[in-house]
Amino acid sequence: MVLLTPIRRRALLAAPALSLAAPALAQSWPDRPLRLVVAFPAGSLTDVLARLLAEPLGQRLGQPVVVDNRAGGNGTVGTIAVQQAPPDGNTVLIISTSAASVNPHIIRRLPFDPVRDFTHIGAIAEAPYLLVVPASSPDTSLAQLVDRARARPGELTFSHGNASALIMTEVMARRAGVRLNAVPYRGGAEALTDVAAGRIDCTFTDFANGLAQAQGGRVRGIAQSAGQPTPLAPEVPPVAQVVPGYDINVWFGLSAPAGTPEPMVRRWNEALNGALRDEAVVGRLRQLGFLPFTQTPEQFSDYIRTQLASWGELVRIAGVEPQ
């Protein structure tokens, strides 16, 4: 016997009525401003992405798209807010690696299922992370950092502002056969600041902030997390040159509450993919460290399942225990 949560039971009971009403609703929808929930604070990478996409999405949907930050719990608070929202097409989520790929493996009683509890709309982008060291560091390459860490086990430090960066670093260190000392921060900006100040030996950070600090002479980029050279910074070698097989990106997409009528999902998907074909939008995304790509709702659902499994293996390698 399968037990249903109250939220799932309401969604299932509402589904027949929604499906019958969907054609009529789709003709008049949207008739009010739409809500784009960001599960991270203002100024975060996810927030920057949402604010970049809000206007082109609104232009294509015919209503303003309002960004709503619901931060907390490594993306859990905002994700739950969308899970519990009415499935009427008016509320969507910037879903990401943290909420849908990492949290299910590190939070014991996660109150949502990233596959079952959402209607997935489409992919937005992948993004490699940049590994940086202080500008004053003696390490000018990842190989030098690894050699120094091997000579001083557990003495070198790395900062992390989210679970993805923690896992990326631990996987790199363990596969390289070295031990680094983790120092947690509330966010990626704070984690990067202490590297720039020389108080921390290294961190994985997003490209937008990392390259800006590097161009300002405060940090040095020594590697990036994608398996191949990235067009975002072709001069920065991949971690895989030192740690064979290393290839880790974070990802972002758009999702709605489970039971959202298909016509509205298709409208959102068409608007999203249209925005991601706009050269000005794509150019700005690349400047911020994103590699945009488009998918159908069905393809994106499959992608999320694949990413959930892949990050489960990375969590295992990193030795991160669920809490």
Image (tube, helix red, strand yellow):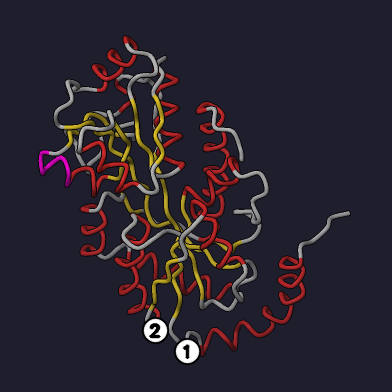
Q: Residue at left 39%, top 30%?
A: 169
What percent of the width, then of the height, locates residue 52? Answer: 29, 66
Image side of residue 134 versus residue 17, left or right: left
Which of the two residues, 209 or 249, is positioned nearer the viewer here?
A: 209
Which of the two residues, 198 or 95, is positioned nearer the viewer here?
A: 198
Q: How far separated are the C-alphas under marks 1 and 2?
A: 7 Å
* Residue 258 picture quarter: bottom right
Q: Which residue is mark 1?
A: 31
Provide the residue span drawn in magenta. 212-217
Q: Secondary structure at mark 1?
A: loop
The three-letter code of the residue at mark 1 reads: Asp
What percent of the width, then of the height, locates residue 29? Answer: 50, 85
Q: Residue at left 36%, top 64%?
A: 50
Q: Residues within 10 Å of mark 2 (few under 14, many from 20)?
A: some
Q: Which residue is mark 2?
A: 63
What percent of the width, then of the height, locates residue 206? Answer: 30, 45
Q: Residue at left 65%, top 85%?
A: 21
Image quadrant holding the N terminus, namely bottom right
Q: Residue at left 59%, top 89%?
A: 24
What percent of the width, then of the height, locates residue 148? Answer: 28, 14
Mark toward the start of the polypeptide (1 vs 2): 1
Asked if the residue at tag 2 contacts the one at tag 1, i.e. Cβ–Cβ closer than 8 Å, the answer is: yes
Magenta stretch: dominant SS? helix
* Residue 105 picture quarter: top right
